[in-house]
Image (tube, rainbow, N blue to C red):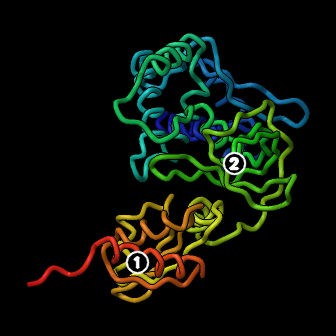
Amino acid sequence: MLETSARLLRLLSLLQTPRDWPGAELAERLGVSHRTIRRDIDRLRELGYVVHATAGAPGYRLGAGAGLPPLLLDDDEAVAVAIGLGTAAVSGVAGIEETSIRALAKLEQVLPPRLRQRVGNLRSVTVPLARPAAAVNPAVLTAIAAAVRDRESLRFDYRSHDGTGGRRAAEPYRLVNSGRRWYLLAWDTGREDWRTFRVDRLRLHTPNGPRFTPREPPSADLVHYVSERISVDPYRYRGRFTVHAPAEVVAGRMPPTMAVVEPAGDDACVLSTGSNSLDELAMWVAQLGVPFEVHEPPELIRHLRALGARLVDAAGPPTPA
């Protein structure tokens, strides 16, 4: 009996991944016969789980039922867990965002409609005291995460930073959270290039597009890649500096949405950032309060010389000792 119960839990864990599971594959994974799989599926149905049989080759898919299957959670506990996971997914707490989204997707898959309504009601009236720079609906995050997992392309309307809008089609690869905003790294099929989209600026269309074959990622370090795309590339001026301070110190004062910081020895780093204003570039690096050299853009070098002369003139002649 104990072995059977453990096998049922393993079977249920597999079925909670939203895909069609051929009976032969389930039997191979669990090390049992196809007949045993059919008996175990019947047991899960008796426990209240809705397991659909797929057409064609014998296969199975877990569905949502009229009632919440036994998960050792009552209705209130299930709602509390769903709300907690949804809050964690957009709270900016380091290290738990992706895990929260995966867990929320599994839970919402089996929530009956009445509990989904309760979760939606609580979300609609809950306002955190502090929130990210741009609010993102957890349902959008879970939908994107599912598309990444299932390798399904997305279709969505997108509003660019300059306010222009348009319809896009993309192959999603990763969700990246900066602590203030969520970004989607995807292959834009219309532009045939990698793009980074702010999730709060897109509106998904359903159903998803066709499945796709994964491509080689644009970088081995996707966090660094996305940071560069959102902090440097969109701007008119791209600044690169050597800053004479440890990389960890500078990175603590320049979040990844503002700059890319790379070590250049124990007491120096290379800082890359962007802006549409030379004055703003100068202010960002000067406010670090440590020595630095400008490598680019050349316009900034000339601008700093003129700015320095104006500041010296503004200060007036030295005060006699």
Q: Is residue 69 above or below residue 267?
A: above
In the picture, measured across the screen, residue 116 lies left or right of residue 58, that is left
* Residue 245 found in image quarter: bottom left
Q: Nearer the viewer, residue 68 or 248?
A: 248
Residue 123 visible in rendering: yes
Going 61% across and 68% down the picture, which residue do you hit?
237
Tell me the number on the disc at residue 148. Answer: 2
* Residue 117 found in image quarter: top right
Q: Residue furthest bottom?
A: 265
In the picture, measured across the screen, residue 203 lies left or right of residue 210, that is left
Q: Nearer the viewer, residue 237 or 46?
A: 237
Alpha carbon distance from label 1 to label 2: 50 Å
**Between disc 1 and disc 2, whose residue precedes?**
2
Q: Residue furthest right?
A: 56
What amino acid is labelled 1 in the image?
A: Gly
Give the x, y percent position of residue 274.
56, 66
Of helix, strand and loop, which one carries label 2? helix
Mark 1 vs mark 2: give the one in front.
1
The residue that label 1 is drawn on is 308
Give the x, y percent position of residue 235.
63, 62
Q: Is residue 292 above or below residue 274?
A: below
In the picture, measured across the screen, residue 187 lies left or right of residue 145, that is right
Residue 31 visible in rendering: no
Q: Nearer the viewer, residue 150 or 294?
A: 294
Going 48% across and 63% down the picture, which residue do you hit?
280
Going 27% across and 75% down the picture, which residue do you hit?
316
